[in-house]
Image (cartoon, grey):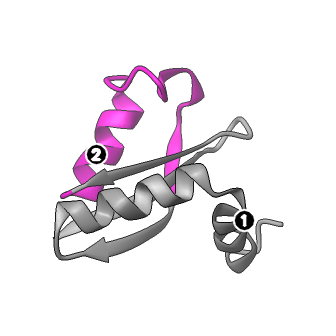
Amino acid sequence: MFHLYIIQSTIKNWKYIGVTENIEKRLLLHNSGATKSSKPCRPLKVIYSEAYNTKTEALIRERHLKKNFKAREAIYISLGMK
């Protein structure tokens, strides 16, 4: 199983969209500073995830969300963030 996930900084207005097989392990890597893009925004928490059977499906969804502002906004609205 592959997961698309969105993490958010608890100290800044910053979000990150990614794909992984293990969300808990990936969050630990982000929070440990091992991920360059999220290091200055720690601590982070998972705010959203979707499960997919294949990595290809998850990567297609990730690409869609990263390129489509309205799709991201729809998720944030559903989470009560807007």
Q: What residue type is labelled 2?
A: Arg
Q: Position of residue 42 (x, y in %)?
A: 53, 31
Work out whether residue 8 or residue 55 is closer to the camera in this orientation and state it: 55
Q: In this view, does 77 lie above or below 32?
A: below
Q: What residue type is labelled 1?
A: Lys
Of badges 1 and 2, nearer the viewer stands: 1
Label 2 belongs to which residue?
A: 26
Q: Is residue 79 above or below residue 73?
A: below
Q: Which mark is residue 70?
A: 1
Q: Is residue 42 above or below residue 51?
A: above
Which quadrant of the view contains residue 22?
bottom left
Work out whether residue 20 or residue 45 is closer to the camera in this orientation and state it: 20
Q: Is residue 8 left or right of residue 26?
A: right
Q: Tell me the magenta residue range.
A: 21-46
Q: Where is residue 71 in the image (x, y as percent from the top left)?
A: 64, 67
The reply to whether the magenta stretch includes residue 35 is yes
Q: Where is residue 34 in the image (x, y as percent from the top left)?
A: 31, 23
Distance (Cα) linking label 1 and label 2: 26 Å
Work out whether residue 5 or residue 9 is closer to the camera in this orientation and state it: 5
Residue at left 29%, top 57%? 23
The quarter of the rendered structure image containing the N terminus is bottom left
Residue at left 47%, top 23%? 39
**SS state under label 1:** helix
Q: In this view, does 8 lie to the left or right of 32?
A: right
Q: Position of residue 52 (x, y in %)?
A: 26, 74
